[in-house]
Amino acid sequence: MASINTYLTKAGEKRYSIHLYGGTNPQTGKPVKIHRRGFKTKKEATLMASRLELEIQNGGINKEKHVLFRDVYSEWYETYIHTVKESTALRVPKMFDNHILPAFGNKRIKTITARNVQQAVNQWFDEVKVNYRKWYHYTNMVFKFALQRGYIQKNPVNVVTLPQHKGEWEDDRNNYWTKEELSRFFSYIDPETELEKFTLFRVLAFTGIRRGECLALTWGDVDFDKHALDINKTVAQGQNGKQIIQTPKTARGKRVITLDRVTIDLLKRWQAKQKEQYTILGFNTSKPKQLVFANTKNGLKSLNTPGKWLHSIIDDRPKEFTPITIHKFRHTHATMMLESGATIKEVQSRLGDADMDVILNVYSHVTENKERETAEKLANYITE
């Protein structure tokens, strides 16, 4: 027999709760106590109590029928954190809390339909330009887990259609710089008084490596004789915001990149300058594991530093530069490579990208530009 009690919320409002015995747990042999609360009227509480008692009489409450999406997510995450890097494991809960759980968290996972998922994906698509694909991907991972555990009989995500942005590359100016903009950018950095800054941006622009990969570089990774850069690690955000060193983002991330003579010469100059400056600070920079770009305590430079340096130059000159982020230096590099005649495979190998989407977008854009140039050259030749 259920008992119905009253209680007050923090706001002082009267609510009803129900308590009843739900039989014995077959695994532990212990009694199952069922507790529900939040009912605004006694009638609502009584009806729910009657429904629960009927389910118990008919063989017990099927907990799997009532399991919420957020509960399945919590169960999935406990397994997931042991399969990924620390930085990834820390980012995922924020993504769920901010985007995925608001859409599905309080819904019983067995009742979520393909239409519910499609509506959520469409809403994400309207909110952002790229990340909605990541949210969709992680939502699918939870549903696949639910299917494996028997919480659902079919995965509603399988029949969802992902929206597509038309003309995404050309519509989004926040993608890359022209070679004129890149040259103009370097003109605002003094290679004598700001050698470290100049060298860091030269490495980013002329290698296409990621910000974290750049900040993780040690002098042992630089082969001055062979003009090569060994990319084998990256800086990432760890527990409690602490920066950590871990393996590259993707399987293709470990790679060796050839360097041009100017970049090699800049690195040699910066190595000598660093040794001079850090000796004064009391640090020995002659060890192979010495960071190429370090903070004043000879530790990892903040991941935010390159971005701050970038914006200190371009934010005051909005008419001179297309606004970009540090990550878009990779897009700029890919564009320059393709415009200079490199193949898609060569670009992919240099960037260390397992995903071809970005590279193909760049290739499409560059190809269209070349076709326009060809058409103009032909027209000029005919009308001469």
Image (tube, grey):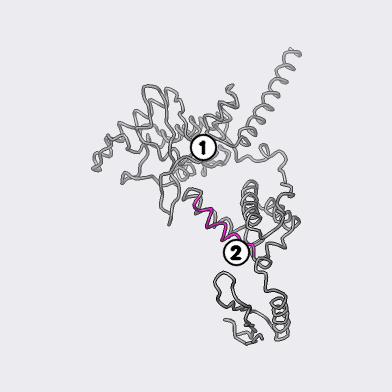
Q: Quadrant of residue 20?
A: bottom right
- Say which residue label 2 marks: 71
Q: Earlier in the sequence, mark 2 or mark 1?
A: 2
Q: Position of residue 111 (x, y in %)?
A: 72, 63
- Per the rendering, the mark at residue 251 is 1
Give above or below for 312 relative to 152: above
How many tags in the picture? 2
Q: Residue at x 63, y 84 (%)?
A: 13
Quadrant the N terminus occupies: bottom right
Q: Residues within 10 Å of mark 1 (few under 14, many from 20)?
A: few
Quadrant the C terminus occupies: top right
Q: Quadrant of residue 76?
A: bottom right
Give above or below for 300 relative to 264: below
Q: Position of residue 194 (x, y in %)?
A: 38, 36
Q: Residue at x 70, y 20 (%)?
A: 374
The residue nearer to you, when weighing 26 against 249, is: 26
Which span of residues is magenta-colored? 68-82
